[in-house]
Each structure stands twice: as C-alpha cells, then as structure tokens.
Amino acid sequence: MGKITIHVLDTMTGSPAADVSLDLYALKGPFEGNWLKSEVTNLNGRLESPLLSGDDFVAGRYRVIFKIADYFKAANIDLPNIPFLEDVSIDFGVSDASTHYHIPLLVSPYGYSTYRGS
C-alpha cells in the first residue's frame, strides 16, 4: 500500500525535530493548491501515522510546508526578527501511488536538505 511518511531532523543539535508543525497540499498549479491536512511531528521527528495513505493517496503533485522558524523559536534559538527560513516548502511528485514516498527534512536555522528516502 502506498503512503507518504515524514522525518524531520535538526542538524544544529543532531537530533529529531519534535513539535514541527506542517501542512500538506495537493497542487493544482505552481501557485494553487488544496489544503489536505495539518500535522505535528512526535519526539522522534516523525508522524504517528503516514501523512497520506489509502484511498486518499493518489498520483499527482504535492507540497509540504514545514513551520521551521516556529520550531526554532520554541526551542529558544535566537533568530533574527526576519528569520532566514520561516517555512520550508517541499514540492514533490507522486507518479505511483502504490509505493512508499518518504520525505526526510534535515534542517537548521540557515539551511536544509531533503531527498526521497525509503
């Protein structure tokens, strides 16, 4: 069964990023999308269940927006008044909804990386 899973790692501390709020959208175009759901990462930087799975998971374009500045502010990290990274938005395509799409996010206040994990 296909699904989307998430894992957020704080590269500044070298630990999972707990309590990161995120929103999932199904994209209709580069600037238009339908909000699907909001979630918050657990102590392991993951979600308790897949972000999307079952009949709700179909081929198409998606966007996950991670509220990164809020996470670092809550961790008492001194950020500028206008943070370098407020939100991290990852747009990705799903061509085969019967497979697993894992979206890891490695993040610090000043940079991030991602890839399709397993």
Image (cartoon, rainbow, N blue to C red):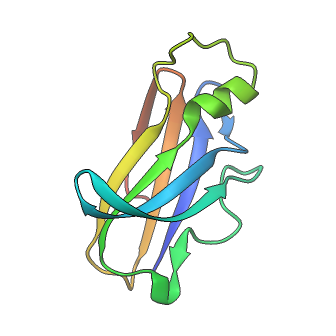
State left or right for residue 84 relative to residue 58.
right
Query: Is residue 113 visible to the viewer in this orientation of the structure?
Result: yes
Q: Residue 13, relative to residue 90: is it above or below? A: above
Residue at x 54%, y 22% (from the top left corner): 109
Q: Position of residue 57 (x, y in %)?
A: 43, 80
Q: Position of residue 90 (x, y in %)?
A: 38, 48
Residue at x 30%, y 78% (from the top left corner): 59
Q: How many marks?
A: 0
Q: Residue 87, relative to residue 55: is it above or below? A: above
Q: Residue 14, relative to residue 29: is it above or below? A: above
State left or right for residue 113 relative to residue 19.
left
Residue at x 66%, y 71% (from the top left corner): 49
State left or right for residue 40 relative to residue 117.
right
Residue at x 30%, y 80% (from the top left corner): 96
Dividing the picture into quadrants, the one containing residue 39 is: bottom right
Query: Is residue 14 visible to the viewer in this orientation of the structure?
Result: no
Q: Residue 31, relative to residue 50: is it above or below? A: above
Q: Position of residue 95 (x, y in %)?
A: 26, 75
Q: Position of residue 37 (x, y in %)?
A: 56, 65
State left or right for residue 89 relative to residue 48.
left
